[in-house]
Image (spheres, rainbow, N blue to C red):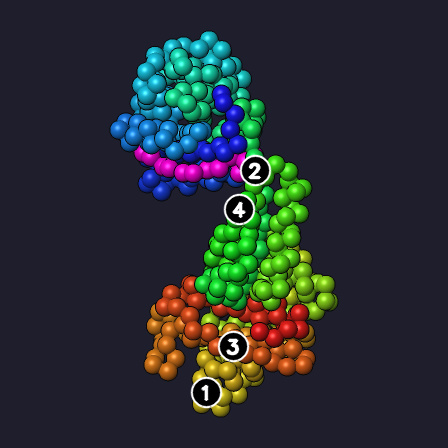
Amino acid sequence: MTKNTNVTAEILAIGDELLYGQIIDTNSHWISQELDKIGVKVVQRSTVGDNRESILSAFKAAEKRADIILMTGGLGPTSDDLTKPLLAEYFDCDIALVPDALEAVRTFFEKRGRELTELNRLQAHLPTKCTYVPNEIGTAPGMWFEENGCVWMSMPGVPHEMKKLMQDFVLPKIKEMYLLPVIYHKIIKTVGIGESWLADLIKDWEKQLPAHIRLAYLPSLGQVRLRLTAFGASIETLQDEVELQISRLMPLIEKYVYAFGNETLEEVIGRLLKQSGKKVAFAESCSGGYISHLVTSVPGSSSYFQGGIIPYHNHFKNKLLKVDNETLSQKGAVSEETVIQMSENVRELFEADFGLASSGIAGPGGGWAEKPVGTVWIACASANRTITKKLQLTQDRILNIQLTAVAVLNMLRIEIYGKTE
């Protein structure tokens, strides 16, 4: 094979069960991650059902797009498993018995005290143009082809079998065949600013990035991840170059950056509370305990989470949190005045350094002209002050709960740092 520094791959998942949604394709996600680690760029991930024309068409399309085609699924011995016969048809070759494969299948069944049936023997019949790749933990062998200027590898769809073939054979083989570039990723996590505003804020910095360092915007609920991807020959050099670019970026967006890498917002909150020796409590109305759930999902949260209340009805806002009935009747549960009292009183009740509150109209019903669905008030009380914020969110109930949680946790993050928005 000719060595190349720009190696591309396509992942092809085969099986009706994937299209029907009966099985989630975790294989393609895992393979993509592993290829990225060794410098192979995945240009396409495709899913195709157990249909002759569809599979052959997918083979033809993948061959035009990629240097390496990695397939999973369709390798069983029954009539609906089409990958093997269609690979033989595509490469115009016969299917023949491979003695080593037959011995491996026989041994597999003998170790388990089971009889080798004629149907199982078919697993040892492979296309004559493939290289047999033993599957030590299953019955369906891997099949490696070098045809039509591409590398092809067919693997079982069972995740642990596929992963072992990838780790033991496919990845080492690819690294042996190709001169691969080094790829380095760095994730910058931001919160409290939308994608378009963030892009506008850093557009001049983005324009001066060198050609071998690329920026991607990855928005999610209330957050935007910035991914810097650098290509080169030395991981150490790339890391230094990326850090230099980040040092130029941070003065522009520092107040929105809460983490680098995989750390979640609730994990950052936990770390900050531990470092500062502070404790927190929540009074959640519209978020229904979701914020407390996020915070307590972090190991060690008992050292800083004091407790919470979910006073969903006004009666309990008054009875448990001492929110004035006059405030509730005149201003309403969804008001700045109400969340101020909720946050201050939950802080006092649980002897916390920070008390946070949420109250809003999650939807889909309950809104009106002055306070439509998606109207949410949040507050954070500390010893020195209480801050509030009004959110105008969406028409979707679950989305509103999730966005409220992000906003509350970000408010807490800012207060721990002692900064203002």
**Residue 389 numbered mark, or none:** 3
Q: Earlier in the sequence, mark 3 or mark 4?
A: 4
In space, the residues marked 1 and 2 are separated at their CA atoms by 56 Å
**Can you see residue 232?**
yes
| Residue at figure coordinates x 61%, y 78% from the top left | 381
Of the residues tagged 3 and 2, which is closer to the observer? 2
Dot 2, crowdedness within 10 Å: few (<14), some or many (≥20)?
some
In space, the residues marked 3 and 4 are separated at their CA atoms by 41 Å
| Residue at figure coordinates x 49%, y 73% from the top left | 285
Position of residue 110 relative to residue 412, above or below, is: above
How many numbered circles does the render carry?
Answer: 4
Position of residue 176 relative to residue 20, above or below, is: above
Q: Earlier in the sequence, mark 1 or mark 3?
A: 1
Position of residue 266 relative to residue 311, above or below, is: above
Instruction: Label 4: state its secondary structure.
Output: loop
Instruction: Label 2: state its secondary structure.
Output: helix
In space, the residues marked 3 and 2 are separated at their CA atoms by 42 Å
User: x%, y% of residue 62?
Assistant: 37, 31
**Residue 331 numbered mark, or none:** 1
Discs 1, 4 touching: Cβ within 8 Å:
no
Dot 3, crowdedness within 10 Å: few (<14), some or many (≥20)?
some
Q: Which residue is mark 2?
A: 37
Magenta highlight range = 36-50
Q: Earlier in the sequence, mark 3 or mark 2?
A: 2
Left or right: residue 272 compared with residue 286: right
Question: Three-letter amino acid code at disc 1?
Answer: Lys
Question: Three-letter amino acid code at disc 2?
Answer: Lys
User: x%, y% of residue 195?
Assistant: 47, 61
Q: Which residue is mark 4?
A: 211
